[in-house]
Image (tube, rainbow, N blue to C red):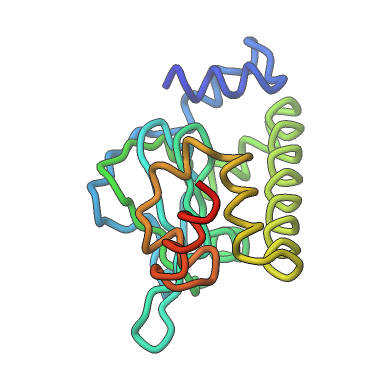
Amino acid sequence: MEQLLSHFLGNGVPVSEISPIAEAFKFKKISKGDFFAEEGKTSKYLAFISKGLFQYFYLKDGKEITTYVSGENTFLASLSSFYKQQPGKEFVRALVDSEVWQIHYDDLKKLKKESDAFKAFYIEAIEQVLAGIDESRSKLIIMTAEERYASLMKEEPALLQQIPLQYLASILGVTPRHLSRIRSNIC
């Protein structure tokens, strides 16, 4: 809980408004291989990862296509499913034994109405997520796989070392073999 509360306090939520936020988030352990969100099911939770690593992926023709990996001290959600409260199209799976603090969709709505500081934090967080999605999309279109790998090395070196190579290759849009060539040329 300390990581989550520190995150809120460090991002402008005053101590006086922490108590209702702490009450709204519930602790959950998620074992390696278990799903946080699944295709065809409506995602009811947004979570803060206090320990662990999660893979976002789609299934296409029986193959996993990894789009993103999220680690500690970040928020976790199947965004479209969660915000539309409709069945999702992606899977979100724990890559290691993980611990999260999660909030139910209804509790999040209530918290946004009751706490101006939380609402401001929430808006800022959503803006950062949208900017990140836009940046990832533009990198995928504009940059080569080598440039995307170099960018990841610069921006998220710790996360890069935690991601299994087959998922990293999928994120970059290359085969694991091509990723090995990229890594040998850059490193």
Percent across and percent down for residue 87 are 49, 73
Q: Image height check: is 30 above or below 3?
A: below
170 sits to left or right of 146: left
The answer to which quarter of the image holds residue 173 is bottom right
- Outermost front residue: 185
Which residue lies at the image location 48% right of the left edge and 54% below the top edge? 183
Q: Image height check: is 122 above or below 173?
A: above
The answer to which quarter of the image holds residue 35 is bottom left
Which residue lies at the image location 75% right of the left edge and 63% below the top edge? 138
Percent across and percent down for residue 127 are 76, 45
- Outermost bottom residue: 61
2 sits to left or right of 127: left
Taking depth in this image into account, of 143 and 51 the one nearest to the observer is 143
Which residue lies at the image location 64% right of the left edge and 48% below the top edge? 151
Percent across and percent down for residue 32 are 24, 50
The image quadrant where one finds the N terminus is top left
- Outermost top residue: 15
Q: How many marks?
A: 0
The answer to which quarter of the image holds residue 136 is bottom right
Percent across and percent down for residue 145 are 60, 65
Q: Image height check: is 71 above or below 115?
A: below
Taking depth in this image into account, of 182 and 5 the one nearest to the observer is 182
Which residue lies at the image location 66% right of the left edge and 57% below the top edge? 147
